[in-house]
Image (tube, rainbow, N blue to C red):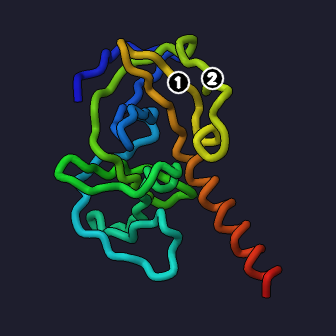
Amino acid sequence: MTEPDEKTSEDTRLVATFLLAGGLFGIDTALIQEVSKVGAITPVRHAPAYVMGIRNLRGKIVTVIDLQARLDLGAADLTGESRILIVENAGEPVGLVVDGVSDTISINQADIKPPPPGLHGIQAHNLLGVHRTGERIVSLLDPAIVLKAEEEHAGEMAIKERVAS
């Protein structure tokens, strides 16, 4: 990653950018506890398809989510460049698997635009906005929204299963 400009104001946020399914995405650095290599992941039976499993990270059990699958972009293809972004959700560490980490950039709040109106479904729901950096567009995510959607989806599925019984 490149070194971010240390001067930030309330109007500016530092964003860690990463690759996912050929696209450039970003998460506010204040929400990322650490970035780690993928390492060994233990599968969890009966978990949703986007839950890759759990991992021991220095004594803490971390649920590992395939962010690409969670965003309905297909399953992740793990490579040597793949990384896990550790974020917190409901007081617990959660790992988001990404294809690779890119740069840390400083973004002015005024430069963040709303998601394109043509986006529908899970992608539109999970985007905070978009930012143009050079010739590329960064799709900004909030892990709380992505993970909240996960919990709501699991709850909806449980209700459907009870009704079907």
Disc 1 marks which amino acid?
Val
Judged from the image, the secondary structure of the residue bearing numbered disc 1 is strand
Horizontal and vertical percent for residue 50? 47, 63
Work out which quarter of the rendered image holds the C terminus and state it: bottom right
- Mark 1, Cα crowd under 10 Å, few <14 / some 14-19 / many 20+, is some
Q: How crowded is mark 2: few (under 14 residues within 10 Å), some or many (20 or more)?
A: some
Q: Which residue is drawn at 48% across and 16% down?
A: 12
- What residue is drawn where x is 77% and y is 74%? 159
38 vs 41: above or below: above
Task: Tell me what residue is drawn at x 23 percent, y 24 percent.
Answer: 2
Looking at the image, residue 66 lies above or below residue 163: above
> Which of 70/152 is in front?
70
Q: Quadrant of residue 19?
A: top left
Position of residue 67 measured from the top left corner of the image (x, y, whole percent):
44, 52
The secondary structure type at the circle numbered 2 is loop
Q: Which amino acid does label 2 sit on?
A: Pro
For the residues labelled 1 and 2, say whether their Cβ atoms are less than 8 Å apart: yes
- Residue linked to disc 2: 114
Residue 109, how many percent across, how many down? 55, 16
Give the percent coordinates (x, y) of residue 36.
25, 51
Q: Classify residue 44 as left or right of residue 123.
A: left
Height in image: 139 above or below 101? Answer: above
From the image, tell me which residue sits under label 1: 130
The tag earlier along the polypeptide, 1 or 2, is 2
